[in-house]
Image (cartoon, grey):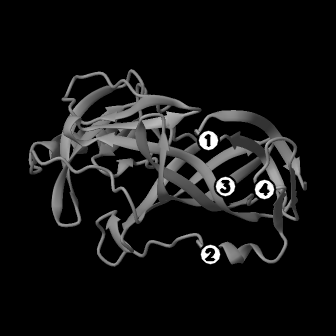
Amino acid sequence: MKIIYLTMIILILGINNSSSQTNVYYPFPDNNAVWVGREWYYVGDCKVLDDNNLFISGDTVIGSYTYHKLLKNGFRWSPLCPNPPGYYYFGQYWGAFRQEIANKKVYLNIEGVDKLAYDFNLNTGDTIISCLEGFNNSTIFAEDSVMIDNTYRKAYWVGISSWAFTLITEGIGSQQGAFSPAYHWDEYGNELYCVQVNSQTIYPPVPGYTCSLVSLKENDLGENELSIFPNPSSGLATIKTNKYFVNATLKVFNSFGVLVKNIENISGQI
């Protein structure tokens, strides 16, 4: 695997010299956008695959800033461990982001705190400062341009270890996802398959590529498969579902976007 990565780096550096560059900044979309990808990790000896789509679902005001909310749908399953069976989830709150377009910066709200995710003012040789795990303190070793929706966008090739790299593109995120960690190992990792804006696939720019989405329809859950009561609640609430959970985490946020409860390692049926 290391030989493949090193060979690709040589090709990338060669491509960099011939690609067209642009001085026009392309921000992240602020509505009608979906990032489709896969996450994988291990629970004991079982490799769990999470095929999902992250999508923008309206805005929210936290403090003095307006953020774009990110929700997540997906299907979690294990190719080697069929019990418990795979299950769908819908409308899972993932986080929120905001942009300073004039400054070419993108921020994430993490547990009520504003943190820098991307800075597209950087150049070759600069060190990335980011709240995204795996990117922080990484070095940009080459700049490039990527054709997205018939226009060129600025992109960075970033070394995330002594032998691995990833590409960060304006308005898209990294090859791992919009705001995913930069790890891509056998044990755990993320991969971005495609991006849709206004129902049109803009990434990857491959003719004929079909961007397959996990269904956005909430009624795919079926009747009475998930219920929370009382809702809203100022104290005790009950969650009931007939879905199986594998190493899940329950996060409860108040109306200001501040995390007030975090329960980890939930497995089984609740």
Q: Residue at x 90, y 56 (%)?
A: 269
Locate residue 152, reporting x and y percent.
16, 55
Q: Residue at x 20, y 32 (%)?
A: 121
Q: In this figure, which residue is indicated by the disc labeled 4?
A: 231
Q: Amino acid at mark 1?
A: Tyr
Kindly indicate whether the residue at mark 1 contacts the one at mark 3 (C-beta within 8 angstroms).
no
Sort mark 4 into few (<14), some (14-19) or many (20+) by Cα contacts within 10 Å: few
Residue 122 percent location from the top left of the image: 22, 29
Q: Which residue is mark 1?
A: 188
116 to the left or right of 50: left
- Provide the residue designation for mark 2: 217
Q: For the point 58% across and 60% down, which residue is it?
A: 52
State whether residue 4 appears in this view.
no
Q: Which residue is mark 3?
A: 49
Q: Amino acid at mark 4?
A: Asn
Q: CA distance from mark 3 to mark 1?
A: 10 Å
Secondary structure beneath label 1: loop
Residue closest to the eye, 249 or 84: 249
Q: Work out how far the residue at label 1 is from the one at label 4, CA to CA, in angstroms.
A: 35 Å
- Taking depth in this image into account, of 232 and 120 the one nearest to the observer is 232
Side (left or right) of 193 relative to 76: left
Q: Secondary structure at mark 3?
A: strand
The reply to whether discs 1 and 4 touch (Cβ–Cβ < 8 Å) is no
Give the mark nearest the N terminus, 1 or 4: 1
Q: CA distance from mark 3 to mark 4?
A: 31 Å
- Which mark sits nearer the N-terminus, 3 or 2? 3
